Amino acid sequence: MVYMQKPWLKFYDPRVNEDVLVNYDSLFDLLHQAAKIHGEMPALTFFGKSWNYKETRMISEMFAASLYRIGFRKGDRLAIMLPNSPHYIFSLFAGFRLGGITVQVNPMYVEREIEHVLTDSEADYIVVYEALYQKVKHVQPKTSLKRIIVAGFGGNRIELGEGDIYFEDFLTYDNLIPEIPINIKEDVALLQYTGGTTGVSKGVMLTHQNLLANIIQVCDFTYNAVDERPQNFKIISVLPMFHVFGLSCNALSGIRMGCNQLILPRFEVNELLEVIKREKPYQLGVVPTMIFALNRHPQLEESDIGNIFYVGSGGAPLPVDQIKSFEKRAGTRVVDGYGLSETAPSAISTPPFLPRKLGSVGIPLPGTEARIVRETEEGYENVPVGVAGELILRGPQVMKGYWRRPGDTEMVLKEGWLFTGDIAKMDEDGYFYILDRKKDIIIASGYNVYPREIEEVLYQHEAVEEAIVVGIPDMYRGETVKAFVKLKAGAVVTPQSLIEFAKINLAPYKVPREIEFLDDLPKSSVGKLLRRLLRKEEEKVEV
């Protein structure tokens, strides 16, 4: 492949390196170095209790020693099924210390999904929140789990089965652990299971280097060009740690920066605004549905959210209209970005030192190559500036592959490039615009229709709160456009009036032929609107 030039580099601040230097021996070394530098400074704050950096390292080492004592060895899998909590951080770094592989298990999974992740990963041990213990216990006989360790956050303890134990009771004060060599480029640190949007949920293998590189990329891109940072550097950790966006860009990056993480186990808009008003944090990471909820809050302007340096959004496309509304009311800036589980996760973003282009996800992070290509008989070629094609990426954050799925790995990793399956375009400055998933393109009368473009138009209507656009079979056009819409509270509008609104803003072949109102639109556990579920429902109706 012929590499494209990098027009975006001309915008880099001189204080931001173009490449990435990973100067840690492992992910545990990240915490070790942070503890040496920040020592007694608070690292984690949870329901009024704080742990400093030394304590965080000490408890993580104690948990690692406890695991080692019962036979946990390098390459073994440690599943974590917890809401955001200090226990998540302790467990995570204990696994890293031993050269183990952490398996991320979504706490909202049902038993079928838990069983799939545990059996596919062949997890040996699990740390689980006590309220979810019975779910894991039910599926344990079908898995290779040897030990269940339970984390509770106060209150009455539940009765555990034979051999199972509470986190605090499991800790040993004998911290003698041999040095375990880590090859950061080859050794897998994390299995992040995909949402299954393209079939069976697959385990993304992220190495120590993948995660370390992305942490450095995110931190340097975001903060190197910032002239002043507060001495009491607080960030809010409300993004789910079980998702790589919340884990890498928030929790682990916060440790590198020496932040005090104000940990919230779940997103609740009133609680979040209260914490912002009381603690005055420097940064907040969100997913788009959190922005939607904040936009609906009647007291957003009085919440002091405008004092936050910036709000970082990722995980799903953020409609331009929602950005404008939020920034006008909140008085702070939203920085949108793009990434995938396969890129640990960040690849493209708009840093604070650059002017933002609404609708764009920004420019590639340091050390990241990005191209827009199309397939030809000879292979793949770059498309002209402004033309849509498939986005492909290369960089130190790109995954090693899919866990025990060489065929799936070969489909997306080619000559070091990750084929994202996302349709995008790049402008003359090197800013990227995500148009849609490759498989979500609607082909109506031979024209390519991108659902996200139509959704952006619908979001501009004052009555629309959320929208999902899908293609449905059409005998004449092949496919036609249908929109599912959730209206704002109290809004009164007809489907036909929304169609007429779309006609003003879209070419005729892009205009929805049908609009259906729903009380709620389906979302993933991290708040991503799930187009595939509605598309499947429509396919059933046609059948």
Image (tube, rainbow, N blue to C red):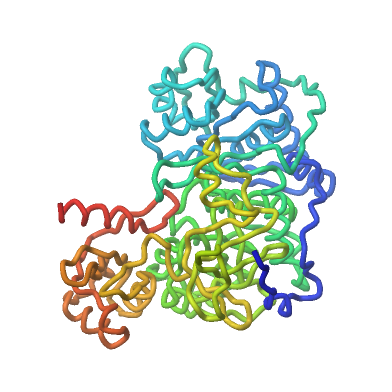
**Left or right for 180, reference 199:** right
Q: Residue at x 55, y 71 (%)?
A: 361
Quadrant in which residue 429 is drawn: bottom right
In terms of depth relative to the viewer, which is nearer, 185 or 245?
185
Outermost residue on the bottom side: it is 504
Quadrant in which residue 418 is drawn: bottom right
Whole-percent x, y for residue 373 in the image: 54, 68
Q: Residue at x 65, y 36 (%)?
A: 90
- The answer to whether residue 19 shows anywhere in this view is yes
**Left or right for 471, reference 381:** left
- The answer to whether residue 84 shows anywhere in this view is no
Quadrant assignment for the N terminus:
bottom right
Q: Residue at x 73, y 33 (%)?
A: 97
Q: Does residue 90 sit above or below 412 in this rendering?
A: above
Whole-percent x, y for residue 430 in the image: 62, 77
Q: Residue at x 78, y 73 (%)?
A: 227
Q: Does residue 306 sit above or below 198 in this rendering?
A: below
